[in-house]
Image: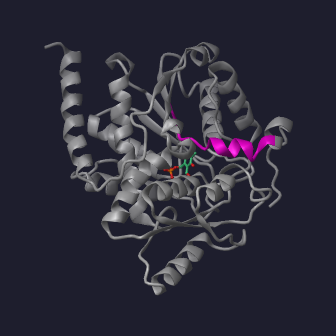
Amino acid sequence: MRRDQIRTTRFEEQIALYRERLDAFPRVDLAHLPTPLDACANLTVSLGGPRIWIKRDDCTGLAMGGNKVRQHEFVLGAALAEGADCFVQGAASQSNHSRQLAAAGARLGIETHLLPKLDRMSSPIRGNYLLDHLLGAMITPIDPSASTIEAKAKLVEELRAQGKHPYITGMGADDSLVLAAVAYVETVFEIVEALSYDDLPDWIYTASQGSTQAGLLVGCEILGLTTRVLGVCPMDNTHEAYLTTHQILELAHGAARQLGYESALALDDILTTEEFVGGGYGLPTDAAIEAIRTVASTEGTLLDPVYTGKAFSALLAHVRSGRITQGENVIFIHTGGLPALFAYGDLLITGEANDTSP
Ligand SMILES: Cc1ncc(COP(=O)(O)O)c(C=O)c1O
């Protein structure tokens, strides 16, 4: 057997073994999977070398797609298995997570409570916040200075007092973050299956608050890939939803344990950068706007201003600085977020980024 055949067989065996384990989780069917992996020939030429692919998790299907649809298959599967009869989530008014949860709740016939912040993107109603309303979520806006974690906990108490069984997702709900990481293991399998074995990635770039990155790392570990996974933070460490590299490592270890093995991933494997946050969470940067325009005009693919635009601006900067070298293969995970484009129209056209008004 040739060496590449041995490797193919090893991948196939590992993938089959871990798919069996993934199939044993309680899971609901929400996402269009596998998502496409686009080879970006024009970008590769315009960047002068590194081969770029975009993993289209913006195409997961439900209510304009995104990474949470993939994650909610596991998170909400667990919620229903525990007897949940309503979902609770809170975040910024343009939260993609909230919109995808509202859509999943609608699909599953489960009441969904959202606690959006009345921030600068909540009025007029547009983008994700508009979709939350159309999807039939029960919406209780909160003050921008309030703690989302505390507001969620208070709502859960009220719902319990009414005899309901609420399930909290997102920040402050560690179990759901681990399951969201479990969901991202499969993405690595899909990538490997879509690529020829000469094209295995040197790098994976993703916008990251933790779970997606942790799951990608576990998927790479399971297959023995030496791929470096860089998580580009959309927020700095003053934000309530920020996770440290220690916490991301814990998510990866937790996901591996759920899949039946002890991970050997160490702190050094958790590569993150906060360099591309700019003025703060939800405030587009000039570099993100450039990234959005570059990918749109070369590949006809849209990125969003809050997550993927900033993550791709890191990729562009690292090609320019030589951190990504000419012959390397790079997968960019498109985690979605596109409805926010329609909330940020003015900023994206005038280029007045880094606006720090509340
Ligand atoms: C578009 C987009 N990308 C990335 C993320 C971060 O995902 P994770 O929390 O799995 O790291 C989010 C979270 O809401 C998102 O909406």
**Residue 33 image position (x, y, % from top left):** 39, 36
Q: Relative to residue 28, is residue 283 drawn left or right? A: right
Q: Residue furthest bottom?
A: 161
Above-or-below relation of 214 to 41:
below
**Residue 45 image position (x, y, % from top left):** 60, 12
Magenta span covers which residues?
332-345
User: Does the segment drawn in magenta span residue 340?
Assistant: yes
State which quadrant residue 318 falls in: top right
Residue sitting at x 71%, y 41%: 341
**Residue 352 image position (x, y, % from top left):** 85, 42
Q: Relative to residue 302, is residue 221 drawn left or right? A: left
Residue sitting at x 80%, y 61%: 358
**Residue 190 image position (x, y, % from top left):** 36, 32
User: Does the segment drawn in magenta span residue 46?
Assistant: no
Exactly how many numbered labels are in the figure? Answer: 0
Residue sitting at x 74%, y 42%: 285
Q: In the picture, which quadrant includes the N terminus?
A: top left
State which quadrant residue 85 falls in: bottom left
Residue 236 appears in the figure = no
Above-or-below relation of 353 to 1:
below
Q: Relative to residue 92, is residue 31 drawn left or right? A: left
Residue sitting at x 72%, y 72%: 143
Q: What colouring style does the render use? A: one colour
Above-or-below relation of 66 to 357:
above
Q: Nearer the viewer, residue 102 or 37?
A: 102
Q: Nearer the viewer, residue 39 or 31?
A: 31
Residue 72 appears in the figure = yes
